[in-house]
Amino acid sequence: MRFLGNLRWPDGFVCPKCGGTKYWVTARCLWRCAKCWHQHSLVEGTLLHRTRFPLKTWFDAAWHVCEQKNGMSALGLQRAMGFGSYHTAWEWLHRMRRAMVIPGREKLNGEVEVDETFVGGVKPGKRGRGAAGKTLVGIAAEVRGRRIGRIRLAVIPDAKAETLLDFVTDNVERCSNVVTDGLASYEGLTSCGYDHTVSRHTPEVGLNLLPKAHRVASLLKRWIMGTHQGSVGKDYLQPYLDEFVFRFNRRSSKSRGLLFYRLLQQSVEHKPIPKKVVRSRPSTAPVL
């Protein structure tokens, strides 16, 4: 309990009602303000709000998720935790994925490769831009010499100029050098305050001149096919992308415990998510 309290109030307890800093812990494990006597639950107003499971169960689930280098599927978590319902494991994983995105996180900077890729199963028909029945994902990857720095991924509806420029401005600092292919939709980057380098002047498949972005796309598809057996619904794809980014940007961490700590820290900082929001899905959503 003290551990979770320190995560929620790292600078010391501050009552949200009166601003008091003195408290005591009641027999029901509630933090009571010594000034206004208001009682606070450690999980009230967080991602774990109104959970009916013991906190230890949540800690165990978070550790299982962070311990595995490539993550876990809902079926794997169900087996590891002994849940009687697959849907419980699925919902818990999606709540954790929501917590993997830090609000107001620092944007990418320096030299950044930007490209798009289609995510989905093998289907007949056109390949590349314009492929039917698949989901378009925007990719931004920092270039750090021969290495890849941080990345950002987002589901985007199309490859029009307005869509792609919004994706870049949401994820890349101004004045950065954005490297793209010759797709006309990227022509407005200079007027948006970016240095724009065109690696090739045709959007058709050819010589790999965006190696960092293409490597990220390849690793993402391999992760979805390997860990999740390719069964990722279109309307649930963004949380999976958030998890991949969370893991990729911390891939050099030698301690699984640090990932566990970050996940719990971000969970107590995240607002509650109603069950209907986690489970909502349009009936027309295709399955990838």
Image (cartoon, rainbow, N blue to C red):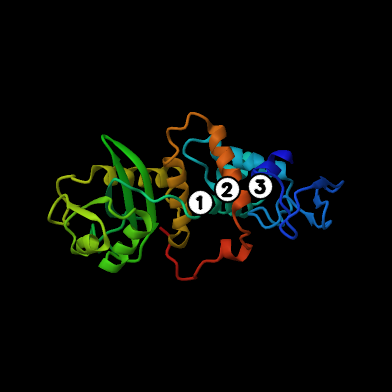
Q: Residue at x 85, y 47 (%)?
A: 26
Residue type, mark 2 in image: Gln
Report, in whole angstroms, how far the alpha carbon at label 3 lies from the one at label 1. 15 Å
Name which residue lies at 52% across and 49% down.
Answer: 100
Q: Position of residue 51 (x, y in %)?
A: 71, 54
Q: Residue at x 61, y 44 (%)?
A: 264
The numbered disc on residue 102 is 1
List the residue tagged with mark 2. 266
The tag earlier along the polypeptide, 1 or 2, is 1
Instruction: Determine whether label 1 and label 2 are within 8 Å by CB.
Output: yes
**In terms of secondary structure, where does tag 1 sit?**
loop
In whole angstroms, how far apart are the C-alphas of marks 1 and 2? 7 Å
- Label 3's element? helix
Indicate the secondary structure of the residue bearing disc 2: helix
State the CA–CA distance, disc 2 to disc 3: 9 Å
- Residue 56 visible in the current orientation: yes
Marks 3 and 1, the one that precedes in the sequence? 3
Q: Is residue 86 visible in the rendered structure shown here?
A: no
Report whether 206 appears left or right of 161.
left
Q: Residue furthest right?
A: 27
Q: Is 30 above or below relative to 254?
A: below
Which residue carries the number 3 mark? 8
What is the three-letter code of the residue carrying label 3?
A: Arg
Residue sitting at x 15%, y 45%: 207
Disc 1 marks which amino acid?
Ile
Residue 126 found in image quarter: bottom left
Instruction: Return the x and y of residue 40 as percentages of the image width and height.
Output: 77, 54
Residue that sits furthest to the top in the current view: 254
Side of 29 where 226 appears, left or right: left
148 is higher (above) or lower (below) than 16 = above
